[in-house]
Image (cartoon, rainbow, N blue to C red):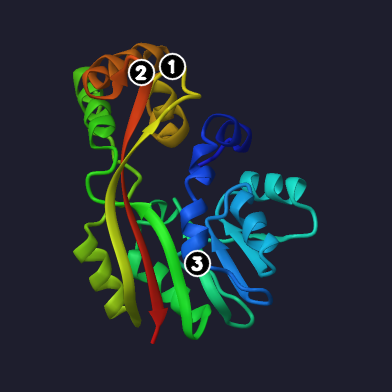
Amino acid sequence: MRWSARAYDNSFGYVSAHGAPLVELLDPQPGERIVDLGCGTGVLTAEITSRGARVLGIDGSQAMIEKARAQHPGLDFIVGDGHDFTVVQPYDAVFSNAALHWMGREPDAVITSVREALVPGGRFVAEMGGAGNCAALTAALSTAWREYGLREPDLPWYFPTPAEYATRLEKGGFTVRLLEYFDRPTPLDECPGGAADWVRMFAGSLLKKVPAEMVDPLLRRVNELAAPALRRESGWMADYVRLRFAAVRR
């Protein structure tokens, strides 16, 4: 998927803002070496660095990495795929916020890559979408596609249950120390176009397969279908469900 780094920061800055509790769970220490996997534009990479750690930001998007380098000169960023990234020397921790659900092609390969990047006893601390994440949003999206005679969209996310992901971590050589699964309804304050704006940002790859003249009416229909569940007097909400964990490499 191709990302617009500017749109991501301008309209979806809450992705990084909600990462603050995860940084506290990571509890980075001065001198630690930490990978920020799926670092985006580097907001949390810089926050972890401010705690005294040495951080390498990795993201699959060239546009995100370019903006991260521009906004945070002096920090280390590279383009890399979470399924098969490697590091020269192992790190003390791997951190990941709102990124693992984009790495669903082979979740076990991601876990293996993370394990290989860690020293024995190293920490894997992350938050991702869990089962049921964006259920109303994706139901509206799928229904609109069907109504317009389009092929059922192949959604690009992986939202596991807590039991499923804990099992993957344990089989992948980790001991799970903490796992939380919780609803987090999130205001889409910067989305004047409602669910349609969310689709344009996070499911833009699906729109590339839609005839250009159909995109706007299709997204209006997504809004109509999603509104009963997600539109409030105060504005639109995203029906997020999160899976947060801390695990240690055995």
Q: Label 3 vs label 1: CA separation?
A: 35 Å
* Relative side of 206 to 26, left or right: left
Q: Residues within 10 Å of mark 3 (few under 14, many from 20)?
A: many
The image quadrant that residue 135 belongs to is top left
- Dot 1 falls on a residue whose secondary structure is loop
Residue 240 visible, this orientation: yes
Residue shown at 21%/57% (left/top)? 161
Q: Nearer the viewer, residue 194 or 189?
A: 189
Q: Which mark is residue 219?
A: 2
Residue flagged by tag 3: what amino acid is it?
A: Leu
Kindly identify which residue carries mark 3: 26
Kindly identify which residue carries mark 1: 193
- Dot 2 falls on a residue whose secondary structure is helix
Residue flagged by tag 2: what amino acid is it?
A: Leu
Q: Percent from the top left, x then y, of residue 3?
A: 55, 39
Q: Percent from the top left, x then y, of residue 148?
A: 24, 17
**On screen, residue 119 above or below 165:** below
Residue shown at 56%/36% (left/top)? 8
- Mark 3 or mark 1: whose residue is earlier in sequence: 3
| The C terminus sits in image quarter | bottom left
Q: Label 3 vs label 2: CA separation?
A: 38 Å
- Dot 3 falls on a residue whose secondary structure is helix
Q: Nearer the viewer, residue 196 or 182?
A: 182
